[in-house]
């Protein structure tokens, strides 16, 4: 089954999960860089964080581009897109 065939609620849920996981990984990377808790390179963690956030943005935009989306799901997708774009911008500017 393709991702485009999934129901909107499932896509929004997965968008949230990918987005929140990316935000948590990015936050851990920033905290480790500033507090020096672990002596490990943070580049790969930053990359995975941004990849997950981009994937979450893509899923929420996929919901927005579908036809005949109920108004409440469309609003949820808009808010999800905005939150993930702002968080992605923040993590890009802090790297």
Image: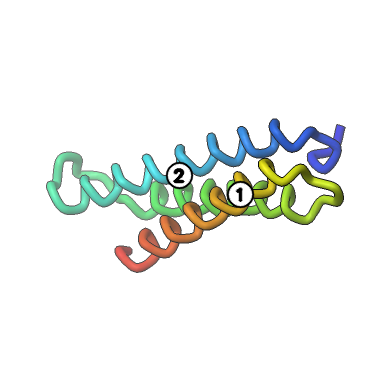
Image location of residue 78, percent across then percent down:
60, 53
Neighbourhood count class around disc 2 (C-alpha, 10 Å): few under 14, some 14–19, many 20 upward: many
Image location of residue 72, percent across then percent down:
67, 42
- The residue singled out by tag 1 in the image is 55
**Residue 17 shown left or right of residue 91 in the figure:** right
**Badge 2 or badge 1: first in the primary sequence:** 2
Q: From this view, report whether residue 91 is shown above or below residue 12.
A: below
Choose between 47 and 50: the one closer to the eye: 50
Q: CA distance from mark 2 to mark 1?
A: 9 Å
**Residue 83 shown left or right of residue 55 in the figure:** left
- Quadrant in the picture for the C terminus: bottom left
Q: Quadrant of residue 2?
A: top right
Choose between 26 and 57: the one closer to the eye: 57
Choose between 72 and 93: the one closer to the eye: 72
Image location of residue 76, percent across then percent down:
60, 44
Q: Quadrant of residue 1?
A: top right
The residue under the point 26% across, 51% down is: 30
SS category of the residue bearing label 1: helix
The residue under the point 61% across, 49% down is: 55
Q: Quick one: which residue is furthest to the bottom in this view?
A: 93
Image location of residue 59, percent across then percent down:
67, 47
SS category of the residue bearing label 2: helix
The mark found on residue 13 in the picture is none
- The residue singled out by tag 2 in the image is 22
The residue under the point 31% across, 46% down is: 27
Neighbourhood count class around disc 1 (C-alpha, 10 Å): few under 14, some 14–19, many 20 upward: some
CB within 8 Å, label 2 to label 1: yes
**Residue 89 shown left or right of residue 56 in the figure:** left
């Amino acid at each position: 089954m393709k991702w485009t065939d999934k129901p909107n609620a499932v896509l929004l849920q997965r968008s949230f999960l990918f987005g929140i996981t990316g935000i948590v990984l990015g936050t851990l990377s920033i905290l480790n860089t500033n507090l020096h808790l672990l002596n490990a390179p943070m580049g790969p963690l930053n990359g995975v964080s941004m990849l997950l956030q981009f994937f979450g943005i893509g899923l929420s935009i996929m919901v927005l581009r579908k036809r005949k989306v109920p108004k409440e799901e469309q609003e949820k997708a808009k808010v999800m897109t905005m939150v993930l774009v702002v968080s992605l911008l923040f993590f890009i500017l802090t790297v």
